[in-house]
Amino acid sequence: MKHYIALIFSACALSIGLFSCNKQKDNPKINQSEISEVNNFEINQIVKTAQRNYICNGANAFFDDSLRIYSTSTVAIQWPVKMSEYNISALQDSLKALALGQTNGSIDEAIINALNHPQGEDLYEMEPVDSIPLNSKCMILYKTVIASAVTFSPHFIVYQVLTSMYDGGAHGIGLSRYLTYIFKLNKVLDIPTAFKPGSEKALLKAIQDQLMTQYGVTSLSQLGDNGIFTDQLYVSPNFYIHGYDIVFHYNPYDIAAFSEGSIDIRVPYQSVAEHLTPTMLAIMEREGV
């Protein structure tokens, strides 16, 4: 047994020695001139969260049920404070508007204002409560808003605002909205900034082609057989940049049955390059703006 253990340690030592040699060979010493090639882009963000519970007085009249109805409202936002030397006021305002429906006041004030006006307040009295008694028979409605950065480059950053809701129907639903913020322009990318006038027909064709590729079909009628509402296809203004693709996002029911869920259609920018504005083309080709 001792000889066996000694052989194991010898083998391990040999392996470690070979690994160390290979590591030194694959990773030669880096000099300071090479280090200077690394650019630093300082980003400072704060995660802000808040939650409030309510009892929905009078909600039984809408649900025709003897259960007590509760609701919970949750907000979680990855809030940008600083991004290198850029002015990000437009990003902050856009993120507040997209996530909370307002731009006035501070982000903290906007979050509290959202909690003060919860989903359902126009239908029944929303009375705040400390907690929801989960061990009792009740129905729990909810609305959750989560905003976070999902991808970035030296020229832009993309945020997703995911809103999940259940208002007492057959099922809940999740909706995603995106914003692509261009640092040097201090603005959020939109259809006029990204695409040339009159490009809608060509963009729609590219979306249709890519959607057929994703579903492995060769015609719009076959897309229809897969649950896509082909007569409702459109160029979604809810788009963002990811790598070298322009991603057009469609929420449930936008262009397909609920069972299909959300649909992202990734269109390579090269396939629609002639329809991009100079600004968008510069961003996609990593030349900056």
Image (spheres, rainbow, N blue to C red):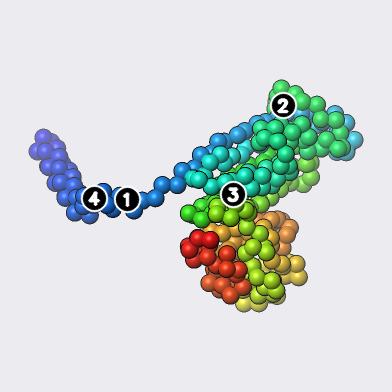
Report the side of 92 relative to 229 (left or right): left
Q: Residues within 10 Å of mark 2 (few under 14, many from 20)?
A: some
Q: Earlier in the sequence, mark 3 or mark 4?
A: 4
Q: Quadrant of residue 48?
A: top right
Q: Real-space Cα distance between discs 3 and 1?
A: 30 Å
Amino acid bearing label 2: Ile
The residue where tag 4 is placed is 31
Please identify, in this view, whether the residue under mark 2 or under mark 3 is nearer the observer: 3
Label 2 to label 3: alpha-carbon separation: 32 Å
The percent coordinates of residue 114 (x first, y second) are 73, 36
Question: Looking at the image, can residue 227 be seen?
Answer: no
Disc with the residue nearer the chain's start (1 vs 2): 1
Residue type indicated by callout 1: Ser
Type of the residue with mark 3 = Tyr
**Amino acid type of disc 4?**
Asn
N-term-proximal mark, 2 vs 4? 4
Q: Position of residue 209 (x, y in %)?
A: 61, 73
Q: Of helix, strand and loop, which one carries label 2?
A: loop
Judge by depth and name the residue closer to the eye, 245 or 231. 245
> Mark 1 or mark 4, which is nearer the start of the sequence?
4
Q: Residues within 10 Å of mark 3 (few under 14, many from 20)?
A: many
- Cβ–Cβ under 8 Å for marks 3 and 1: no
Mark 1 surroundings within 10 Å by alpha-carbon count, few (fewer than 14), some (14 through 19), many (20 or more): few
Q: Vertical placement of 231 versus 238: above or below?
A: below
Q: Nearer the viewer, mark 1 or mark 2?
A: 1
Using residue 273 as the reference point, say whether residue 238 is left or right of it.
right
Q: Secondary structure at mark 4?
A: loop
Q: Which residue is mark 1?
A: 36
Question: Above or below — where is 125 with respect to 158?
Answer: above
